Image (tube, helix red, strand yellow):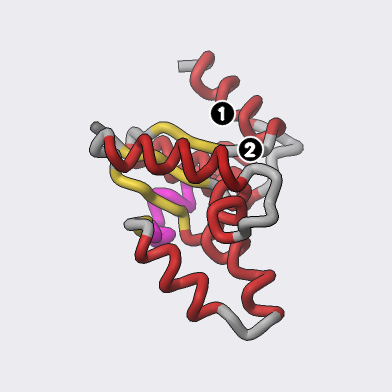
Amino acid sequence: MGSLILDASVLIALLDRADRHHARAVEQVEAADQGGDDLVAPVSAYSEALVAFARESRVDDAREATAAMGIQVAPLDAGTAERAAALRARHDRLRLPDAMVLATSQQLGGRMLSYDRRLQRYAADETDGD
């Protein structure tokens, strides 16, 4: 048991049946949920995943689907923001939204799930550096 931190690529895959990662995302998130993990989306990733829904005035649909899956949206607090800034300072090419996902994962002591290979590499670098 622990926390599974979902980045935007996973949230988008969960919410969009046409996404190439949809089946994999559903399988992995369901397994984590059944294993007792808390499902957490950093507010930055949640916002990023909502963009397509906002374009179609369907944010309510995405909010309801996210809640129905038991995904909690983690707010951005000062500690997470500071950790994200430190990550961004260490890794010149790490985008701030991705740094926020990594920082949330570190703050909560959780595992991160992402289909973004670049973010996966940064997460591995941070784990190897511990």
Mark drawn on residue 123? 1
Callout 1: helix, strand or loop? Answer: helix
Label drawn at residue 99: none
Q: Is residue 78 magenta?
A: yes
At which x and y percent is residue 30?
38, 42
Q: Nearer the viewer, residue 43 or 60?
A: 60
> Disc 1 versus disc 2: distance between alpha carbons?
12 Å
Residue type, numbered disc 1 = Ala
* The N terminus sits in image quarter: top left
Residue type highlighted by circle 2: Tyr
Q: Is residue 128 above or below residue 47?
A: above
| Front label number (1 vs 2) | 2
Residue 48 occupies which quadrant of the picture?
Answer: bottom right
Element assignment for label 2: loop
Residue that label 2 marks = 115
Q: Residue at x 62, y 59 (%)?
A: 16
Q: Quadrant of residue 38?
A: top left
- Magenta segment: does it hold 13? no
* Nearer to us in this view, 54 or 97: 54
Q: Earlier in the sequence, mark 1 or mark 2?
A: 2
Please rate how many residues cluster around mark 2, counting C-alpha atoms within 10 Å: few if below 14, some from 14 to 19, many from 20.
some
Q: Residue at x 69, y 56 (%)?
A: 18
Q: Which residues are magenta?
A: 73-82
Name the residue at 56% across, 60% down.
15
The residue sitting at 75% across, 37% down in the picture is 93
Left or right: residue 84 versus residue 1 is right
Residue farthest to the bottom, as pictured = 57
